[in-house]
Image (cartoon, rainbow, N blue to C red):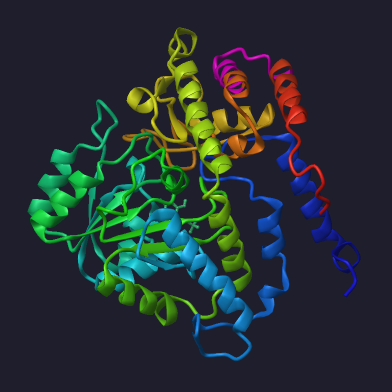
Amino acid sequence: NAPLSEVDPEIAEVLERELNRQRGFLEMIASENFVPVSVLQSQGSVLTNKYAEGYPGRRYYGGCEEVDVAESLAIARAKQLFGAEFANVQPHSGASANAAVLHAIARPGDTLLGLALDQGGHLTHGMKINFSGRLYDIVAYGVDPETSVIDMDEVRRLAVEHKPKVIIAGWSAYPRQLDFEAFRAIADEVGALLWVDMAHFAGLVAAGVHPSPIPHAHVVSTTVHKTIGGPRSGLILTNDADIAKKINTAVFPGQQGGPLMHVIAAKATAFKLAMTPEFKERQERTLRGAAILADRLTQDDVKNAGIAVRSGGTDVHLVLVDLREAEIDGKQAEDLLHDIHITVNRNAVPNDPRPPMVTSGLRIGTPALATRGFGDVEFTEVADIIALALIPGADVEALRARVATLTEAFPLYPDLQQ
Ligand code: PLP
């Protein structure tokens, strides 16, 4: 039981360097966040040793009395947090949750209608070489080429024409709120089930600063590690008792074996924290930060460099930058921001002429910086740094110094040692 630094110094160094990287960079990948130390504690705990196939009170292994308490707390808190009648907290990830949802409510060969990957959808919503695209018959909707907003008339037209078994509402790169009511009306009209994947915006929903899909969808899936800022994992919710039963069977034994009890305990803590006023205030800062960024990136100096913001702004935690008319492509922009110690990801924009490894866009999110403590003043500074970085002729040294001032003023995990 020697410490990691003795047993495996190479890995110990990875942990230490990664902590320093997180401390020294501005994390703006829209799907990332910083978990609190309390969540790290559960995830690095002895609960990782425990096998607990089954559900609380109905396990296939002995010795589950303590992990039963943890999972029951996670379930009760998830239900309370989102106002849902049923929660399954066992999915290992967002993709596992989505596989279980489809396992529960569709059969291979059924038709699914979801947002195309290159229009902002997720791999698990029907991408060709993903399980979803291989097992199901996929029809995809996109965004309006002019407004970059989902056209509900087009969704309805495709639904009426193809009569899907499931309509998927949810996204990985889309800067606007979805109209859950309209999606449900279309689903009802064509006899489809509505599945909302709120992986990205679940934290906003939990805080009440974004409409909730729960009253409208037949089933809702999410990750716990994006805007919620909990452990890397998934969650499924529903108010439909019949679907609830199918979800439990689909997760275990349908998709998974033993649940990750250390992660489930950490989820319980994350859900508890998500019910606090501090969490709501953080989500409000997240939204304001994204709005400040969108505002700065639509100013004339940025526009004149051929850079645009998809849909002209945002009402969520991210901004989609359109570089199709700019001198730099998505890869170059990502590298440039990395050079000044800001981490973002390049992202295809709808109708992107460049290949997926290059792209003509950036996805920039504010959740991690809001967790780090950033408010309007800091987001205004970050937005200006990004704007100046993307305009040709940036003074990289000067911008990196401005980033360093911010990272030093907001120390990350000040007491943590890896
Ligand atoms: N669903 C959506 C909408 C996502 O954006 C993501 C992650 O990017 C996932 C599901 C999958 O989550 P995970 O990476 O945990 O499998």
Q: Is residue 34 left or right of residue 254?
A: right
Residue at image point 82% right, 46% down = 415
Task: Give the x, y percent position of residue 109.
Answer: 22, 70
User: In this picture, which residue range is highlighted in magenta?
Assistant: 382-397
Residue at image point 14% right, 50% down = 186
Is 327 part of what is drawn in magenta? Answer: no
Q: Main secondary structure of the magenta part?
A: helix
Residue at image point 34% right, 49% down = 170
Task: Give the x, y percent position of residue 339.
Answer: 68, 29
Quadrant hosting residue 392: top right
* Up/down of 221 relative to 92, above or below: above
* Up/down of 60 relative to 221, above or below: below
Task: Give the x, y percent position of residue 132.
Answer: 33, 63
Residue at image point 56% right, 62% down = 268
Seen from the viewer's position, the closer of residues 47 and 3 is 47
Quadrant hosting residue 62: bottom right
- Residue 260: tell me if it is visible: no
Quadrant hosting residue 242: bottom left
* Up/down of 222 relative to 385, above or below: below
Task: Give the x, y percent position of residue 418.
Answer: 81, 54
